[in-house]
Amino acid sequence: MSGRTILVIEDNEQNLYLVRFLLEKNGYEVVEARDGQTGLELAKRLAPAAIILDIQLPVMTGYAVAAALREHESLARVPIIAVTSFAMVGDRERCLQAGATDYVEKPIDPGAFLAKVREHLQDER
């Protein structure tokens, strides 16, 4: 995988389309998974530069995926940006405690989302 490959683990078609569009338009290669287990398996196999992780996923929650990703040495330092509609007090902290590097609320603000991705991948530029 190139240093510009991002794994997007998202089950909602519209959110996946938006994230893919934004990332590809900005020169990133996107690999996608529609559930947590598939995302975890792809991450282990591909070692992407970053992971965009929905929290409400079928099969495995985003919290479980983030925790499992952090257990693998090859993925321990890969930025994980949690994307969720959970916006209550404590939700950000719960995402970070599970292993996410950062947190973005839905609906996604395109400019803020891309700024976060770039921030976490800045060493490659």
Image: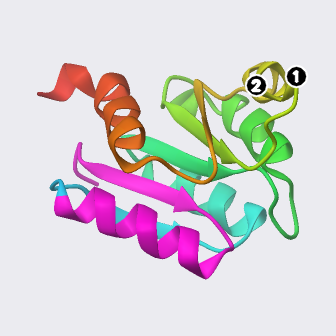
Q: Is residue 81 magenta?
A: no
Q: Is residue 108 visible?
A: yes
At 47% from the left and 56% from the top, the residue drawn is 7
- x and y percentages locating residue 24 in the rendered image: 24, 64
Q: Is residue 24 magenta?
A: yes
Q: Relative to 48, is 76 on the left or the right?
A: right
Place residue 11 in its image quadrant: bottom right
Residue neighbourhood size for the residue with mark 1, other residues' Cα within 10 Å, grouped as few (<14), some (14–19), many (≥20) = few
* Residue in the foreground of this view, choosing between 85 and 51: 85
At 77% from the left and 50% from the top, the residue drawn is 55
Q: Relative to 87, is 80 on the left or the right?
A: left
Q: Secondary structure at mark 2?
A: helix
| Residue 92 numbered tag | 2
* Image vertical order of residue 74 relative to residue 105, above or below: above
| Residue 110 numbered tag | none
* Callout 1–callout 2 Cβ contact below 8 Å: no
CA–CA distance in space, label 1 to label 2: 7 Å
At 40% from the left and 47% from the top, the residue drawn is 48
Place residue 56 in its image quadrant: bottom right
Residue neighbourhood size for the residue with mark 2, other residues' Cα within 10 Å, grouped as few (<14), some (14–19), many (≥20) = some
Task: Pick the quarter of the image with the N terminus.
Answer: bottom left
Q: Residue furthest left?
A: 125
* Residue in the foreground of this view, choosing between 86 and 28: 86
Q: Which residues are magenta?
A: 1-25
Q: Amino acid at mark 2?
A: Arg
Q: Amino acid at mark 1?
A: Val
- x and y percentages locating residue 86 in the rendered image: 81, 43
* Residue in the foreground of this view, choosing between 73 and 51: 51
Task: Pick the quarter of the image with the C terminus.
Answer: top left
Residue hosting label 1: 89
* Image vertical order of residue 3 relative to residue 44, above or below: above
Q: Residue furthest bottom?
A: 13
